Amino acid sequence: MAQNSSFDVTTGVDLQEVDNAINQAQKEIAQRYDFKGSKAEIDFKKAENMLVLIADSDFQMTALFDVVQVKLIKRGVPVKNLDIGEVKPAGGDTVRREVKLKMELDSDTAKKVAAAIKDAKLKKVQASIQGEQVRVSSPSRDDLQEAMALLRGKDFGVELKFGNYR
């Protein structure tokens, strides 16, 4: 009997890299002329997987978010995994924006990943949803490589990670 090979499809961000990017962004904001004398803050809430940006105006919020985004990209954090909230007024004539970090596949995305594999009609390739991940299995490793290439080519709104390949 042929042994089934499999891999897991997950998503997430490296929280240490996010922390490093936020520290770099805070250093840059402290030195930039357009932020001198203004209230511009970045608060990284690790427990809630969330960034809270606070600035004096919409213009400064845009500049602050651009700095954060550039630093995240340089640190290799997938920007697709950011759930960017609306800019809302906050106390003391400031504006606030919450940015959530997507750490796991939600059920809708997992269903889309499984459906994409089924729709491709690859021979003997099966996808099963297991909590926050999708396990893709097949007797042929070549078919699994084909499934990975198929998933890389599609956009699911988050950065997909492939792991546990055996």
Image (tube, rainbow, N blue to C red):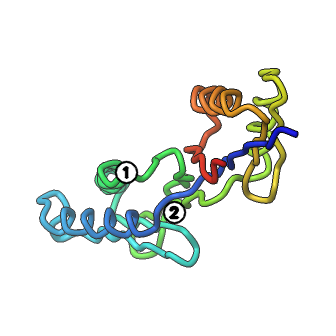
* Gap in angstroms between the C-alphas marked 1 and 2: 21 Å
Determine the image quadrant of residue 64. bottom left
Question: Residue placed at 51% from the left, 59% from the top?
Answer: 99
Task: Please give the residue where the numbered disc 2 appears in the rendered image.
Answer: 98
Q: Is residue 119 left or right of residue 69?
A: right
At label 2, the amino acid type is Glu
Mark 1, mark 2: which one is toward the viewer? Answer: 1
Task: Please give the residue where the numbered disc 1 appears in the rendered image.
Answer: 76
**In this orientation, which residue lies closer to the viewer: 36 or 121?**
121
* Relative to 131, residue 6 above or below: above
| Label 1 Cα neighbours within 10 Å, binned few <14 / some 14-19 / many ≥20 | few
* Relative to 158, residue 93 above or below: below
Question: Which secondary structure, mark 2?
Answer: strand
**In this orientation, which residue lies closer to the viewer: 110 or 134?**
134
Question: Residue placed at 82% from the left, 23% from the top?
Answer: 123
Which mark is first along the chain, 2 or 1? 1
Question: Which secondary structure, mark 1?
Answer: loop
* Percent position of residue 18, x then y: 40, 64
**In this orientation, which residue lies closer to the viewer: 92 or 40?**
40
